Amino acid sequence: MNSISRRLCPLFLFFCTLPAFPWGQKGHDTTAAIAERHLTPTAKDFITKLLDGKSIVYWANWLDNASHTDEYAYTKTWHYKNIDEGVNFDEAPLLESGDIVRAITNQIDIAKDPESTEDQKRLAVKIIVHLLGDIHQPMHLGHASDRGGNSWPIKYFGRDVNLHGTWDGSLPEAAHRWSHTEWVDQIDRATPQEEAEMLRGNPYDWGKETFEICTKVYEETPRDTEISYDYVAKWTPTVEIQFLKGGLRLADLLNALFDPTYTSRTGAVKR
């Protein structure tokens, strides 16, 4: 091995051990960037000032790190709603520490409350931006028994991985090796009629919708499934539509919260 190879080999091994870009990175950036495109000028101006000049894309992944700090540890269970096989979504037991559906609803209430402080509204927006991405990632509505697919072993192009991690990063990256801005340019092309259809419902409905997708994912990805090109091709449209739904719904929600003249097309914000 020559000197250049000796220097590059440890670097190569380092990059190979890094986790795949999670839905929490590429997916959240894409979701937030789509939403930003659809904000009204009034809502965008209010949110930009609230977030000290930074965009919602800047904060899209913040909660993934924040939830692991002492200050925001209470939000750890807010990223998901785990429901075991055979349990109906409507009858699923509730965690005392909260889940993604209730967290989104509660943060909406805080953001729209005229008695909430600016700091409370700021935090609510940052949490909402992140959780609107999470609620559209199928495995965030996965089984409690296997930690949302984290303990569901599969093979991805011959590598031993788990179902959750594959949906977090490997699948979106295999679908399209794009930057989040390229994702936005390519998938944010819905017709007004398609947008109207996607904007129906509220956080509860969206969670149930994702839960139904997750149920199909489990059915079609038994333990030890060997995932390859066919699987990527089959599920790529689902990844695309979930990114888009998350962005459009986030925009509608934020517009309804921060633009008094906006008429919401979802049932997420009740005035």
Image: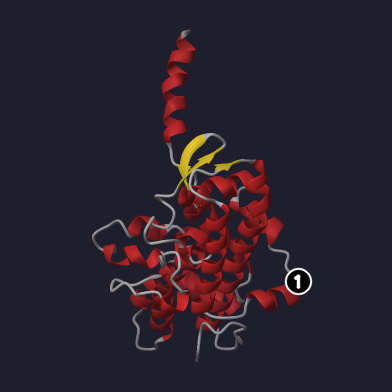
Residue 67 lies left or right of residue 232; in this view the side is: left
Q: Nearer the viewer, residue 260 or 245?
A: 245
Q: Nearer the viewer, residue 115 or 72?
A: 72
Residue 63 lies left or right of residue 169; in this view the side is: left
* Crowdedness near tag 1: few (<14), some (14–19) or many (≥20) residues, C-alpha within 10 Å: few
Q: Nearer the viewer, residue 191 or 254?
A: 191
Query: Residue 201: x, y in percent?
Result: 57, 81
Query: Residue 10: x, y in percent?
Result: 41, 22
Q: Secondary structure at mark 1?
A: loop
Name the residue at 53% across, 78% down: 205
Relative to 239, say whether 247 is above or below: below
**Colouring chosen for the image of the structure:** secondary structure
Label 1, on which residue? 191
Name the residue at 45% across, 10% down: 3
Name the residue at 52% across, 50% down: 222
Relative to 191, say whether 108 is above or below: below
Residue 117 lies left or right of residue 234; in this view the side is: left
